[in-house]
Amino acid sequence: MKKISFLLIVLLLSATTFAQKKTTTTPKTPFVWEAANVYFIVTDRFNNGDKTNDENYHRNKPTGKLRGFEGGDIRGIIQKLDEGYFTNLGINVIWMTPVVEQIHSGVDEGTGYTYGFHGYWTRDWTALDPSYGTKKDLAELVQKAHAKGIRIMLDAVINHTGPVTAEDSVYPSDWVRTSPKCVYNSYDTYINCTLVENLPDVKTESNENVELPLFLANKWKKEGRYDKEMASLDAFFKKTGYPRAPKYYIMKWLADYITEFGIDGYRVDTAKHTTEDVWADFKKVCDRTFAEFKKNNPKKVLDANPFFTVGEVYGYNIGNKKLYDFGDKKVNYYDNGFTGLINFDFRNEAKMNYEELFSKYNNILQNDLKGNTVMNYVSSHDDGYPFDKKREKTFESGTKLLLAPGISQVYYGDESARPLDIEGTQGDATLRSFMNWEDITNNATTKEVMAHWQKLGKFRKKHAAVGAGLHTQISAAPYVFSRTFTKGKYSDKVVVGLDLDKGEKSVTVGTIFANGTKVRDLYSGKTAMVVKGMVSLDTDYGIVLLEKL
């Protein structure tokens, strides 16, 4: 009996000790959208993983330079995912240009004959364009990305269809308008008009019941899926009570990518070219669908985060805070379906010094935009005035973008100095060259740039405090700051030093790390102890990224 009692006591003590250890374990770094590191891909221009899908619908006419399909596809993205390319960059969200079926032919926009390689010229929202791959490919991409802790964000276009061609009939007149062309001098002249010539504008203001376009019905019948698609539409409209208006058809079709694949978010194209209530409704549809997906697929649920939407309100910048001004009307898009908006002025404000830039963004995000966020970029697919068009400030670009408060959007090739000024191109085409894989493999300078972006990206991914935390300057010279973040039981603190001396250096950590704390510099990999509020390191770099060990 005494032996049994003794064993029971030992077991109870062991269990108590284990429980204490378990409760004091640092919680896993949560995924926080406000701190995300997004990698933006023009799907056709990233990596050709399947050469058998390179030509479809006889899209073989000569085009203007960089205005035709070049072979990039979902399979190519999967290949790079498998290789660990995104993990090595610290990416936790992949955003792709639209992968839905594009118009079959092309148009001459005055910049050379052009096909819809970019994905924004929709013909059928319910189908993937075979040039990008199959639904099986997309399912594999989402599954593999999620397994690596990477979210997938697709691109939603509700504002317009693709251009009309001899092979691509116009949607019916109760679906779209083909005139007038927008003149952009008032709220109304951004919305009830076409963005450019021959880009039919969806009548998103309409709540009238309309029939499915005949060409689409015939297409589905030919593909053997008409009955299934119609039954799905009937179920959606019965469930939601929405009228069978054009916008709600499209919202349903886009939400199907949540139901079928479990995608995590949408970047919304041309958001200011519809009335804002369209996006409030779209978010409701996405939220409801995402909740149903989680309920029906408990093993595929990554976390408790809601569905994420970020809007392209062209010209919005963080200084606008919550209101975008059309001149005759101000609109709050954050109150109409968006958690975040693309910040179109970061590429200008990146010219500021570090503290001026970081403190401005911190003050707005921690106050006026608390609970919301912005997505920053230094270059993009349709911004002809990037921060560093000649790629002469690639290290500075990475440092400012990846350490700035808010979401960072890495445009494919930012990390490899992919050229943005291509001779012989016109318009946006110069921004959309094929990914420079050969430089990444063979160019020593490119490898150095890549290493810089990788270190900063992994630091950002590991520490939610970098993008979502409270920014505090610790020292002006040398420049040192901290970021702190708390969410539930998770607490995160980091200290960053920039423009420091190479070699031996002492970095003040203020009150962030107590004396005796062991810390690691994630840029050099070296460790040190905090002594009298200072960390002494000897590294080959002028950057220090400190975390508690």
Image (cartoon, rainbow, N blue to C red):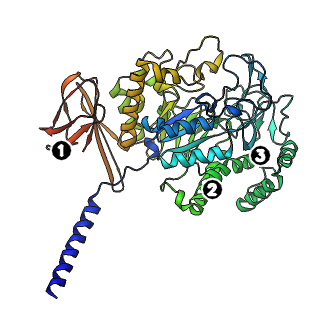
* Residue 167: percent from left, percent from top: 85, 31
Rendered image: mark on residue 423 = none
Q: Disc 2 or 1, which lies upstream in sequence? A: 2
Q: Nearer the viewer, mark 2 or mark 1?
A: 1
Q: What's the CA distance linking mark 3 and mark 2?
A: 19 Å
How crowded pointer 2 is (Cα within 10 Å; few <14, some 14-19, many 20+) is rated as: many
Which secondary structure, mark 1? loop
Mark nearer the N terminus (3 vs 2): 3
Q: Which residue is mark 3?
A: 246
State yes or no: discs 3 and 2 in contact (Cβ < 8 Å).
Answer: no
Q: Which residue is mark 1?
A: 517
Q: Amino acid at mark 1?
A: Thr
**Residue 289 numbered tag:** 2
Quadrant of the image containing the C terminus: top left
Q: Looking at the image, which residue is at 60% across and 31% down? A: 42
Q: Name the foreground residue: 417 vs 1.
A: 1
Give the quadrant of residue 194. top right
Q: Is residue 341 visible?
A: yes
Tell me the amino acid under the disc marked 2. Answer: Thr
Task: Left or right? Give the position of 126 relative to 545.
Answer: right
**Hey, which quadrant is residue 494 in on the image?**
top left
Q: Residues within 10 Å of mark 3 (few under 14, many from 20)?
A: many
